Image (cartoon, helix red, strand yellow):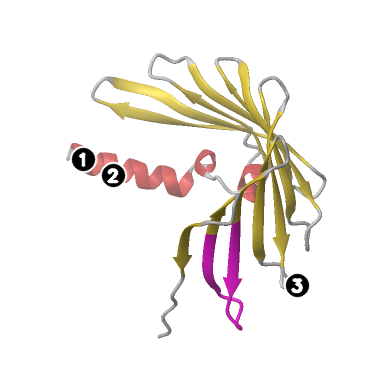
Amino acid sequence: MRSFLFIITIVFLQLCSPALAQNKSDLKKYAISSFSTELIDDSGKFIERTEKYYPSGLLAETIEYDKDGSVKKRVLFVYDKKGNIIDETEFKADRMKHRFVSEYNGPGSKKSAEFEYLADASLKSKKLILYNRMGDKIEEQVYDKQNTLIEKSIWTYDSKGFKKEKSQYDGAGNLLNSRKYTYSVK
């Protein structure tokens, strides 16, 4: 009986509670400013993660907690006018661990570059992203702080625009791995 009531309660909350709505339009509609998840195990319950939102419904901050309630990781998000993440900064123990800054110049405002900075604000890596005329990602190039190519990924597509293959190479052009995609038609 107890498990039946538990299941009914969960179903009711999922259907009726706006706090469980996690899409942007519901967050905005119900003016939800934060959302938390709790983990319940044999040692008791604790808040595992909290998400805070801007009034627009975009994610502003995530906070992950340890079992003792201390903050394990905190990530802040900043967006441009089109809703693209342009700055994502991660903190551990109230110290910046790294920061990602993105540029959007690709077709349809797709991400064209991402820069990763270390806690001392020095550049760790730079990722350049290229697209074909259809807006599909065809190449990513990752460079270190000396602007030396350290990794490259290439995507290929069939005539219908379906992804065929993704190949990853090291900075010297040696193939690291290749992933092939196969589609079945009914």
Q: Quadrant of residue 46?
A: top left
Q: CA distance from mark 2 to mark 1?
A: 6 Å
Q: Give the residues in magenta.
A: 153-167
**Helix, strand or loop at mark 3:** loop
Q: Residue placed at 35% from the left, 42% from the top? A: 10
Q: CA distance from mark 1 to mark 3?
A: 54 Å
The reply to whether dot 2 and dot 1 touch (C-beta < 8 Å) is: yes
The reply to whether dot 3 and dot 2 touch (C-beta < 8 Å) is: no
Q: Quadrant of the C terminus?
A: bottom left
Q: Is residue 19 left or right of residue 32?
A: left
Q: Is residue 133 visible?
A: yes
Residue designated by label 1:
3
**Helix, strand or loop at mark 2:** helix
Q: Residue placed at 71% from the left, 44% from the top? A: 114
Indicate which label's residue lies in the foreground, 1 or 3: 3
Give the percent coordinates (x, y) of residue 86: 75, 41
Q: Amino acid at mark 3?
A: Arg
Residue designated by label 2:
7
Q: Quadrant of the N terminus?
A: top left
Q: Any magenta on residue 155?
A: yes
Q: Residue placed at 64% from the left, 47% from the top? A: 24
Labels 1 and 3: the sequence-earlier one? 1
Work out whether 119 lies above or below 17. Answer: above
Residue designated by label 3:
133
Q: Is residue 55 visible?
A: no
Q: Any magenta on residue 93?
A: no
Work out whether 63 lies above or below 173. Answer: above
Work out whether 73 lies above or below 1. Answer: above
Q: In this orientation, which residue lies closer to the viewer: 7 or 100?
A: 100
| Crowd class of label 1 (few under 14; some 14 to 19; many from 20; radius 10 Å) | few
Give the percent coordinates (x, y) of residue 32: 62, 36
